[in-house]
Amino acid sequence: GDSGNMFYDFWMGRELNPRWGTFDWKVICELRPGLIGWMLLNLSCMAKQYENLGYVTGSMILINLFQGIYVWDALYQESAILTTMDITTDGFGFMLCFGDLAWVPFTYSLQARYLVENDPHLSYPALVGVVAIYAFGFMLFRGANSQKDAFRKDPNNSRLAHLKYLQTKRGTRLLTSGYWGMARKINYTGDYIMGLSWCLVCGFGSIVPYYYAIYFAILLIHRSIRDDFMCQEKYGEDWNTYKKMVPYRFIPGVV
């Protein structure tokens, strides 16, 4: 649409899903080019470290493993993006174009690039600890997203019969138990914990690898506020009831 503000329209995009025939530019660009480019850069960094040192450090192996799993999971579950805010709400403007095609591959690979020249010399117990943090984050992230996706596809599935939900006046059911009974954005929490593990594997010698933890916290908080506002408009009083049933946004009992 046309907001009347050319700068806003350029940033957010005027068309929701621009297409050439059946080719959907936004759906294609949302994941594949940026994520695959990110992994190619990571692997290039690992090759460069081997060229420099004659071996690959434990931290470099882990960052490629962690982020490789993350990328594989995103591509394997690609159909799930069709219900995300990027696809359903935001236009395909500069924000998504630049973010998908440039920001993701060239900034998300920052940890690998840092490790090319900097070995934090983490001990084996430290590496195991970081693996445990990543595994916990992945469990939250994938478990929550899979549970919601399965419920959306078939809310009457017998395997989901134990889950409680709020029936809204719009006809939508909002989960209030399972992963989604812990916090309204528990998937964001898992996503952030995974991202934090990417930073931790670089040690504490520089703040540079921690750019992602700082940036991602801001992004997730902002996105959760936007989502809360849109859901308030969408569900009205039902959303207030839902927030009373699931009072925490990110961390159960904390915030």
Image (cartoon, helix red, strand yellow):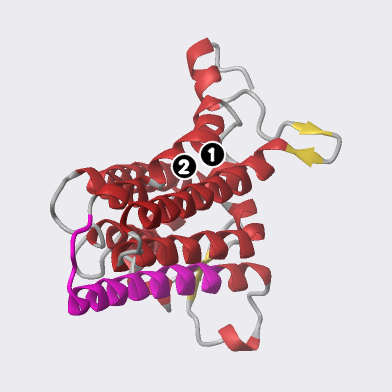
Q: Residues within 10 Å of mark 1 (few under 14, many from 20)?
A: many
Residue 246's spot in the image, x, y percent? 34, 67
Relative vertical location of residue 130 with respect to residue 75 in this rendering, above or below: below
Q: Work out which quarter of the rendered image holds the C terminus and state it.
A: bottom left
Residue at the limit of the structure toward the left, as seen here: 205
Residue 121 higher or lower than 161, as above or below: above
Q: Which mark is on residue 234?
A: none
Distance (Cα) linking label 2 and label 1 = 6 Å
Disc 1 secondary structure class: helix
User: Is residue 184 something one can see in this rendering?
Assistant: no
Q: Which residue is mark 1?
A: 100
Question: Relative to the observer, which residue lies in front, 84 or 245?
Answer: 84
Of 108 and 221, the residue lying toward us: 108
Determine whether, in the image, residue 147 is placed left or right of residue 14.
left
Q: Position of residue 234 (x, y in %)?
A: 52, 46
The number of numbered discs placed on residues in the rendered structure image is 2
Residue occupying image coordinates x 19% and y 74%: 126
In the displayed structure, 41 sits above or below 183; it is: above
- Three-letter amino acid code at disc 1? Asp
Majority secondary structure of the magenta segment?
helix
Residues at marks 2 and 1 touching, judged by CB atoms closer than 8 Å: yes
Q: Which residues are magenta?
A: 119-148
Q: Nearer the viewer, residue 231 or 34?
A: 34
Looking at the picture, tell me which residue is in the foreground, 38 or 196.
Answer: 38
Residue 56 painted magenta: no
The spot of residue 64 in percent (x, y) is: 42, 61
Whether residue 145 is in magenta: the answer is yes
The mark found on residue 104 in the picture is: 2
